[in-house]
Image (spheres, coloured by chain):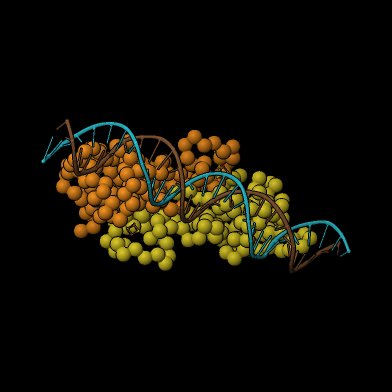
Chain colours: A yellow, B orange, C brown, D cyan
DNA sequence: TTTATATTGGACTAATTTTATCCCATTTAT
DNA sequence: ATAAATGGGATAAAATTAGTCCAATATAAA
């Protein structure tokens, strides 16, 4: 019932990028050093952020990673989803899973409600908010 | 970011007990058959519910498991906690974990708030409520 | 007192997920 | 060319989750 270490790596990476001058690329190497993240693992992590349209990358000398959109448009939920897939508090709350009991299962009903409350909080604040609240 | 299978086993077990006549014991064997839970694994699961004071057990012929308190006094959060330990959306939100960054970490702050919202929902409804909403 | 029933508890195994590493290919600026 | 950087496949290590096996103990009933 925890976010994974990789998800936290992703958040910290995006915070690092959001803190950098707008439009500037940062290499994964540099991020890994500054954030204490294993660099090869960070590469994999960033490769999950690309298809989620949270960052863009550029190869070669002077290349690196930058935000794909303004920090005001990226929520914590976006990041979690990019790394872990759609958040589900139980199997039956995940897309494409069908449990025959679901229609009259009070557990899934409660977990569904609880999940809604959770998603709302995770969606409320953006990367930009997070940066600001650090100051 | 999901409850474990074992936690769901625990919930279904307690629902089964709550549905039985008050004060009546049910054997783990019977529960495992009715709920489709591996019986040896269910035994382990129930052994986690005993020290959490959610059920009491009685050995020997005619023995079994029963609720340790009224179904109105058992919340979903109680059950999750009994099986998985104190719920924490990230390591640093668990008791006895100290991250030096925590004081000015906006991630832990947001996750903390989100966790609060989640806990509130999980605490809101009791086993009794769950039974009633099935009808 | 024997027997059948049921939980207790420890050791063990299996499966799955998470975390991490290795290594080579490809792209790009200088 | 060369150095810097990401892309991506294969694999390994570690941790967690799920499940099994079995002997011991307690209890009620025959
Ligand atoms: S039994 Fe209920 S909680 Fe469990 S998987 Fe089915 S619908 Fe979900
Ligand atoms: S860096 Fe922030 S979120 Fe991560 S463990 Fe430390 S306090 Fe928690």
Image quadrant of residue A60? bottom right
Q: Position of residue A88 (x, y in %)?
A: 43, 58
Residue B35 spot, x, y in % from top left:
28, 55
Residue D10 in the image, given as x and y percentages of width and height? 64, 61
Look at the picture and state if B56 lies above or below A108. Answer: above
Picture mark count:
0
Q: Which residue occupies 47% across, 36% down? A: B95
Q: Is residue B41 visible?
A: yes
In depth, the one of A1 and B119 nearer the eye is A1
The one nearer the camera, B32 or A23, is B32
Residue A125 horizontal side relative to residue A53, left or right? left
Q: Is residue A105 above or below residue C3?
A: below
For residue B70, say whether it is visible: no
Q: Residue at x 34, y 63 (%)?
A: A99
At horizontal 52% and vertical 41% (from top left) the residue drawn is B92
**Where, by quadrant of the figure, is residue D24 drawn?**
top left
**Which residue is located at x 57 percent, y 52 percent?**
A6
Q: Work out whether residue B98 or residue C10 is closer to the camera in this orientation and state it.
A: C10
Q: Is residue A20 above or below residue C7?
A: below
Q: Quadrant of ligand 1?
A: bottom left
Q: Position of residue B37 (x, y in %)?
A: 32, 53
């Amino acid at each position: 019932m925890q976010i994974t270490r990789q998800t936290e790596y992703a958040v910290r990476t995006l915070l690092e990028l959001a803190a950098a001058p707008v439009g500037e690329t940062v290499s994964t190497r540099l991020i890994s050093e500054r954030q204490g993240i294993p660099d090869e693992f960070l590469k994999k992590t960033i490769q999950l952020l690309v298809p989620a349209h949270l960052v863009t990358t550029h190869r070669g000398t002077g290349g690196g990673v930058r935000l794909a959109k303004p920090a005001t448009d990226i929520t914590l939920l976006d990041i979690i989803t990019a790394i872990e897939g759609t958040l589900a508090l139980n199997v039956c709350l995940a897309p494409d899973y069908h449990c025959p009991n679901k229609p009259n299962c009070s557990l899934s009903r409660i977990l569904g409600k609880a999940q809604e409350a959770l998603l709302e909080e995770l969606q409320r604040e953006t990367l930009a908010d997070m940066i600001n609240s650090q100051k």
